[in-house]
Image: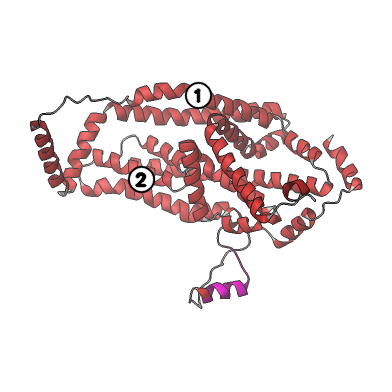
Amino acid sequence: MKSGILSGKVEPATHWAIIGLFVLMSVGALSFAQSFFIPVVFAVFLALIFSPVRRWLGRAGIGPALAGAIIMTVFCLAAFITLYVISNSLATILSDEPQIMNRIQERLQEISGVLEPVREAGKQIEEMQANNEGPERVVVREEGIFSLWAETTPYVLGQAALAIVLATFLIGSGDMFYEKLVRVMPTASRKRTSVGIAREVENQLSTYFLTIFAINLILGVVVALAMWALGMPDPVFFGVIAFALNFIPYVGSLAGIGFAFVMALVTFDSLFMTLAPPFVYWLINTAEGQFITPVAVGRRLKLNAVAVFLSLAFWAWLWSFVGMFLSTPMLIALKAFTERTPELSWLDTFLQGRTECDPEDNAIVSEALDDEGADVCDAPDAIPQDELADNEEQSGDDVPDDDEDDRLAPAIT
């Protein structure tokens, strides 16, 4: 009598062990072959995000291939302008790096007298080490940032070219992915479920990022005007980095605030003017994050803040800076998949923000927290219950329906 995997039955412990090994091997593969996976994943997300634009151009009489070329041309021009402004301003700043570092040190000493004892102690330690005779030390000079750019630029350009070309082909293929997906599914119910999941991922990604793009564009303009009003140098640069960094949750806004503080420290003499630019930057970014984005994006795409941070940390660890940009689309795609998959409804519950729950559940949580007035669930469900019921009914239908398959066939030929 056969048992275990050979009999088709797997013990729960073995089942979870296999899943754990698969996850570990997948993470290892994504890390080892990141030079291939990063541009491929980036291209897939670009194709999904710009699918509504491609369909809109199609209704205007423009074919998918031409639409893909137009979309990616505009995208490349926008990316080039953004990178040009950032790199040009950074090159100007780095050319005066010694003067800037000396200025920062002087300002910090003026602002805080706490640094003076530390500096004196450092001088004494250096003098003591200089008086002691010892073997000659070899100082290894690190490569400058420009030489580092020269080494990494061909690699980055190669990945960018792969992503752009692949995204152009994916957008130009139209809805071929949906047609292939329908063909490979065995039953009509699975065809509909699979297409529904793919369309949900596409809708949520495109809705979220096209909305965030518009919000970040407005944010960049407001930040640039604010920096100009405060007398900061190169306000356009601050607007561009505010636009670009805001695609990275949490870390992007902190980086922008820190950079505004450093440049204000170098530019102004008074403490008030030194603190004003980073405070205004923080104020604008907070207003955008707390009021504008939640209203524009809507509660349906609201994500758990802890899940967003963990996703950011994981993908930053796996794929470095590029992973920070891709962390949110990865999480949105996962959430869209779990919404349409009843077996993963528990994961969807953890990924989404605060949602409406049963009064009995609310009472149980309040009792556990010793707070009878606690309201732990205050937002509507991320997906209507009638849609979830339809999905469960479709997922439970594993019996092939030849009549429905025949009716679907003409639509995909």
At mark 1, the secondary structure is helix
Residue under label 1, please give it. 157
**Quadrant in the rendering for residue 252:** top left
- Which residue type carries mark 2? Ile
Above or below — where is 248 with respect to 44?
below
Residue furthest right in the image: 403
**Residue drawn 13% across the image and 28% down it:** 134
Tell whether 391 sits left or right of 24: right
- Which residue type carries mark 1? Leu
Magenta segment's dominant SS is helix
Q: Is residue 229 visible?
A: no
**Residue drawn 40% across the image and 24% down it:** 149
Q: Which residues are magenta?
A: 355-367
- The disc at residue 257 is 2
Determine crowd level at label 1: few under 14, some 14-19, many 20+ residues with C-alpha closer than 10 A: few
At mark 2, the secondary structure is helix
**Residue drawn 64% across the image and 38% down it:** 48
**Residue drawn 63% across the image and 37% down it:** 50
**Quadrant in the rendering for residue 205:** top right
User: Which marked residue is nearer to the observer: mark 2 or mark 1?
Assistant: 1
Which of the two residues, 236 or 259, is positioned nearer the viewer here? 259
Q: CA distance from mark 2 to mark 1?
A: 29 Å
Q: Horizontal and vertical percent for residue 402? A: 91, 46
